[in-house]
Amino acid sequence: MTDPSLSRRGAIALASRGCVIALAACLFPTEAWASPSEAKALLATLGPGALQPGKVTIGAPEIAENGNTVPIMIDVDSPMTDASYVKTIMMVADGNPLPGVARFELSPANGRAHVEFRIRLAQTQNITAVALMSDGTMWTATKNVKVTIGGCGG
Amino acid sequence: MPTTAKKGDIIDIKTLISHPMVSGQAKDAAGKIIPRDIINTFTCTFNGKQVFAMKLEPAISANPFISFPVKMTQDGTFDFQWVDDNGQVYKDSAKVTVT
């Protein structure tokens, strides 16, 4: 069955994308965007292990109306004891001018592996978080965030 | 953040600092790139020992909000430090008593 509102939705999506491109063109010096491969390369600096999906949860809005401040939460499933804890959490974004977002250094003193912060997203894109555990394993999660108005410049 | 906590409790620390976080991506009216000026490092120590640190990139929003938990085992003082690209250091501290 065809949803009659689909074409309207498509038109809205197209219109908002046009708006983002126009904003980007006026605010960014170049049209260079980070790519998924650049984001991956940055994550590889975290450690030698392979990335496994799991343990990491990203809390972010499905649709961010304002790309200038998108609230993000990252939780990692870890007991946070001296024997087993999250050492580092890194977040990258594959559709911003630069792929880096933030890097957190945690310790057993945190008791819980949880961080909250706010980020800029220039356009609809995937954000990826990786947790490096005290045993050297690395766990990852990715979330797509739709951005209505890009967080250009600042 | 709370000023008292029960021994073993995990408290949430929420920090907010006023800073424009100039991304270095935007141009001024004359078409020149406005130089990057962001808070690039945040650290939190408890009784002198680091419990949390963050490296910030231009993708962090203006007036950075950072929140993280800490498990309280003893009385002490949290020292917070933010450093920006110009080398300016912003500091704050808070005491917590464990009951």
Image (spheres, rainbow, N blue to C red):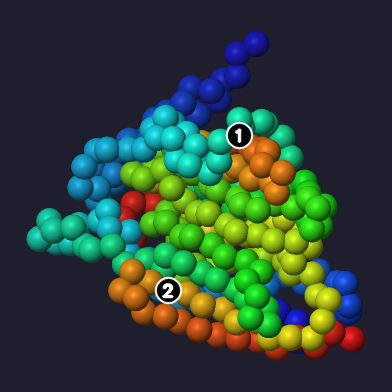
> Where on the picture, by quarter, is residue A56?
top right
The amino acid beneath tag 1 is Gly
The image shows residue A4 at horizontal and vertical percentages of 56, 20
The image shows residue A71 at horizontal and vertical percentages of 57, 56
Tag 2 residue: B83
Q: Nearer the viewer, residue B76 or A70?
A: B76
User: In this rendering, is residue A50 above or below A1?
Assistant: below
Residue at x 67%, y 65% (from the top left corner) = B68
Residue at the top extreme?
A1
Question: Is residue A63 at all visible to an observer of this figure?
Answer: no
Q: Is residue B35 left or right of residue B70?
A: left
Kindly identify which chain the residue marked by label 1 belongs to.
A
Residue at x 43%, y 48% (from the top left corner) = A100
The image shows residue A30 at horizontal and vertical percentages of 21, 42
Tag 1 residue: A49
Question: Which is closer to the viewer, label 1 or label 2?
Answer: 1
